[in-house]
Amino acid sequence: MNEENDYSSEFIKSLLPSAQQQKKIDALILIAAKIKAGMKAKGWNKSRFAEK
Amino acid sequence: MREISSFKRLFREACSIYSVLEDDGIPKYQKFLNELHSDYTEELININGRIKSIGKYGALEDYFKLEEWKHDERICCLYDEPDSELRLFCVRFENEKIVVLGSGGPKPKSIRAWQDDLKLEREGNLIITISDILRKKIELNLIHYSHDSLKLLGDLNIP
């Protein structure tokens, strides 16, 4: 079958965040990703924290 | 027989979201929402927001709780907040452009690991099986990626 499912059903729509909530979710993730990328670039990682 | 199927009308700029279809043709993810929406409305709204965000920016590691899966590091959980109860098992492909959603449920604070809960154990083991099957089919060229790597093409049935 492999047909695409409709993610826009009324039920699912009722469980989607508002535009403002979505912006917040996007921003939090992007900030976390940026911080992690910055840490990696400086050679920091979890195991290095663990050693200290 | 199960199969996986993609959700349309989700952002597809960076990642496609698939879900496992049950024998009745209903995606497991939809059943997950149906089962939990009355008790976990806010959490599910947040998880849906994360899924939309993944569609826009790709399946970055930061969206997921990466469990220590011994044999398959693609298996992970989506959750709404780090200290929350809900877990949604999924397979995250290496290219960060495809995610397959399974199902899940609440992981009570009283248990240490998801294997300690009957439903989570069942759903966790199912997603492990699905990941194994997909990996094997890709190796055998029964499934391949589209040119933009945003689609899985071929035999998506899960026996």
Image (spheres, grey):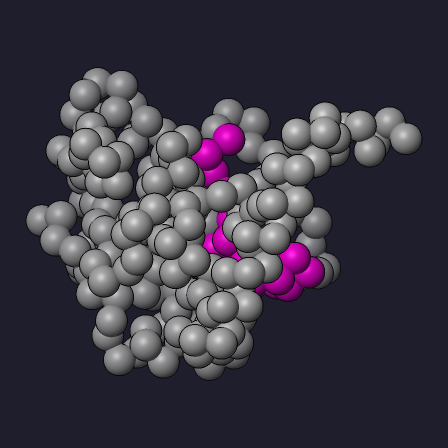
Report the span colored magenta.
Answer: B73-88
- Residue visible at 26% across and 35% down? B149
Which quadrant of the figure contains the N terminus of chain B? top left
- The quadrant holding residue B137 is top left
* Observer-nearest of B37 and B115: B37
* Observer-nearest of B56 and A47: B56
- Residue visible at 51% across and 74% down? A21
- The quadrant holding residue A34 is top right
Disc tally is 0
Which residue is the extreme one toward the right? Answer: A52
- Residue visible at 49% across and 43% down? B60
Where in the figure is residue B44, as x and y percent of width and height? Answer: 47, 70
> Is residue B114 shown in magenta?
no
Q: Is there any visible trace of residue B121 in the rendered image?
A: no
Image: B74 above or below B34: above
Image: A18 above or below A43: below
Where in the figure is residue A39, as x and y percent of width and height? Answer: 70, 36
Where in the figure is residue B96, as x and y percent of width and height? Answer: 40, 38
Q: Left or right: where does residue B135 sit relative to residue B54?
A: left
* Observer-nearest of B71 and A29: A29
* Observer-nearest of B127 and A40: A40
Where in the figure is residue B28, as x and y percent of width and height? Answer: 32, 58
